Amino acid sequence: MNYDHLTEAVATIASASGRDRHAAAVVLGSGLGDYASSLDETIEIPYAEIPHFPEPRVVGHGGSLFSAPVGDEAVLLFAGRVHTYEGWGLDDVVFGVRTAALAGASSVLLTNAAGGLGEGLAPGDLVAISDHLNYTARNPLVGVNDDRLGPRFPDMSEVYSRRLRGLLERAFQIASVTYREGVYAWFLGPSYETPAEIEMVKRAGGDLVGMSTVPEAIALNHMGVDVAGISLVTNYAAGITDAPLSHEEVTETAAEARERFTAVLDALLPLLVAG
Ligand code: HPA
């Protein structure tokens, strides 16, 4: 990870937004990116205008960073993220959240679309991530450690902060959305999992499965940032039902859940910047 590249990106974000500090950040997952443009008085900074920022390789979605005022503070929202399955290295995958941390974010919410396999989970459910399983054998901290970012061997016993999970529970209550927690299993993708893989995850205690979030969570934990995660269950994981999985199902369910997701985030943002 090139520290100078990070500070160059942080400087551009400060000058483009007119704000030296952002107290918190939110990464918006598949189908959830529209939330940023629903906020008032945002300043949009296309990823293409930020030095060293990777741009998502999905046609028509270059991705943008939004700076939004929340109370007396400001929040960064990432509409669009890059994934390892697109061919990006993990330094690129975690570049955005590392800049957010250096821009002052002491709390970061990571959101994603995920397959559900946990007891009682169904498409449309929003689930707070309590912990993760890493099935990729990859880690963004591999390589020479930069001590300015964090320690060589970071503790991982509470990656998804209990304090922030308390705030999530409150935000879910305010939004009248049932609060649930689950363990998220990271697979590389881009192919979906096989039923045998999902059976393995089930036996290991996983509830959710997806292709993102974990590298960002590891990098933020390395930097001492409090992490929260929300998965939107967009489909039953492979083999839970007979239905084949499709990206269309994922984006359709995300669109249907937009109202509840928006209500939870509207309730959460003031709590995130206050805490
Ligand atoms: N598996 C992996 N990633 C996903 C899924 C899934 O079932 N649904 C949405 N993203």
Image: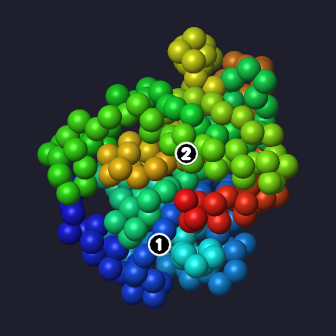
Question: Which quadrant of the figure contains the C terminus?
Answer: bottom right
The image shows residue 194 at horizontal and vertical percentages of 58, 20
Residue visible at 69% across and 65% down?
35
Three-letter code for the amino acid on which mark 2 is drawn: Arg
Is 189 in front, or is 44?
A: 44
Q: Which mark is residue 235?
A: none
Is 68 in front, or is 91?
A: 68
Residue visible at 60% across and 43% down?
165
* Foreground label between 1 and 2: 2
Q: Residues within 10 Å of mark 2 (few under 14, many from 20)?
A: few
| Residue 180 visible in image | yes
Q: Distance of mark 1 from mark 2, alpha carbons?
A: 19 Å
Query: Image height check: is 32 above or below 201?
Result: below
Which residue bears the numbered disc 2? 163
Task: Provide the secondary structure element on which disc 2 rests.
Answer: helix
| Residue 62 visible in image | no
Three-letter code for the amino acid on which mark 1 is drawn: His
The residue lying furthest to the left in this view is: 144
Query: Image height check: is 217 above or below 100?
Result: above
Task: Provide the secondary structure element on which disc 1 rests.
Answer: loop
Which residue bears the numbered disc 1? 22
